[in-house]
Amino acid sequence: MKASPILSSGKKFLCKALSFLGIGLLLSACQLPKDTIDAEVCIYGNSSASLLAAIQLKKSGREVVIVSPDKYMGGMTIEGLGGSDINNHAGFKNDHVIGGMTLEFYKEVARHYGIANFDSARTDAKTWRFEPHVAKRIFDQWLEDYDIRVYRESRLRLAFDAVKKENQQLRSFETENGKIFRADLFIDASYEGDLLHYAGVSTIVGREPNSLYQETRNGIRHSNTYRNFEVAVDPYVVPGNPESGLIHTIQDEALGAAGAGDQRIQAYCFRACLTKDTANRVPFIKPENYKREWYEIYLRYLDAGGTLYKPSYSIPNNKTDLGAWHDLSHNLYGMNHEYPEGDYQKRQEIYQYHLDFTRGLFWFLANDPEVPVGVRREWSQWGTTKDEFTDNEGWPRMLYIRDGRRIQSDYVITEHHTRKDSSIFIEDPVAIAFWPPDVHHVRRIVKEGLAYNEGFVFGGENWKPFQIPYRSLVPRKSETTNLLTPTCLSSSHIAYGAIRLEWTFMLLGEAVGIAADLCLENKVAVQDLPYAALKAGLEENGQIIGMR
């Protein structure tokens, strides 16, 4: 399908001439129309789910376009999250729920690293691990192989009038760079859910109260021992004096009522790719705007006898996928709550703060004379890599967005779906989530005169894998009838913590690609797609939708 034509050069000349003669014309009549791009399906977002949805649609013969707000395509899969969370826990193996093109991605990874027999090696967690640039190479090759049009650095204009609807059908949206994207069907595969929100879909950010869905692990956590401080850390600028204020990274907030809801979200961080390999290592650099007072809490933690985290190799070729889930690390609890619904400037400020803080922290741990010599000796051996994120001084170009908007549709996945002691029949499964509820701390406050991390939920004994229903991927019919999402699905905050893995998003991306094709073929609203047809398409693609 072709883009709308621009005004001819003759018409432009006429506009200039009439303007020169002083003939009053409306300014809009003489302006060039905005660049309009047409497709059958338009996908918004830079995530791995965007690619999987687009590939499936191209395989089905659909004209598809991806609109990426960022320069690079692949989301966290190419931005440092190479650990995959597949078969990496002694208590369970989850590789058997991965199928379709998602499985093909990991087979490509294995081929790159010379693993000749994938089937015999798939139980080994190392089989599923990869370097960021390897994931990027695979995705870039797929985009080329399937001839997928991608409009990069094209951010949605964050305004309700940027999205045009007729009745309940989304017709187009406008980006900040003046492009208008029109399509018969749309997919929001972003982490933030911007298109969903500005299309008028009901969304939520943060934690629901436990009472809303009769949950037990959502909302404010009054008693939280998991990943909390192992030692007593005084939170005040002048130790023992509340009147002196709080040291950096601690928020001045009351604990609140147990189980109450709020708009707080779990922490973001960088998945840092580091190495000790001197041939590939770039030593940590002291940032220009380094603020030593930011790191006072680390000194107090060490002085109190705490043991800080340290890097270790976790992906191929002597590199880390350094996450942050510890009591004290580069996970910045409570410093990101404005991100999901913030404008681009606010999001950039939060990104830059996290980058400045993390770069400064790693330099601090490797160099500051007050840091114990053993800690300095360990951290000073590490550095960023020469061959990853080469356009950003070795640092990921995006934060790990663990939480964004979630839609509120007629079907909501809740904690009950994740529990062993609960049985919920799913009539329309499209994929299986095989991970325990995993929600990092949402803030760091003062409790009983000491620093306290609040909000972490992970695992436990009462969890199980569960089927993800198609109904959770569609908005309410009264809001929009031609919009799907694989990343901002309808779930409670605690249930989303079991879904938010990159490979689960990839599975869901392929599923919405199949669904979008069938909706167009059958000329039905996304809410009215017969599940029998969708199930046949999923099974034909090798997607795993049945429970063992």
Image: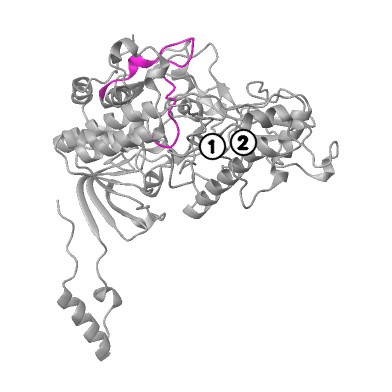
For disc 2, the marked residue is: 333
* Residue 250 seen: no
Q: Type of residue at label 2?
A: Tyr
> Magenta stretch mostly in which secondary structure?
loop
* Residue 56 seen: yes
Q: Which residues are magenta?
A: 78-100
Counting from the top left corner in percent of width and height, residue 310 is at 61, 27
Quadrant in the picture for residue 52: top left
Is 97 one of the magenta-colored residues? yes
Q: Answer yes or no: do the residues labelled 2 and 1 have beta carbons within 8 Å?
A: no
Residue found at x 78% / y 29%: 303
Note whether 546 is above or below 284 in the view shown. above
Counting from the top left corner in percent of width and height, residue 359 is at 59, 42
Residue 12 as seen in the image, left or right of residue 359: left
Residue 184 as seen in the image, left or right of residue 309: left
For disc 1, the marked residue is: 268
Is 246 one of the magenta-colored residues? no
The mark nearer the N terminus, 2 or 1, is 1
Quadrant in the picture for residue 164: bottom left
Counting from the top left corner in percent of width and height, residue 41 is at 22, 43
Q: Quadrant of the C terminus?
A: top left
Q: Secondary structure at mark 2?
A: loop
Q: Secondary structure at mark 1?
A: loop
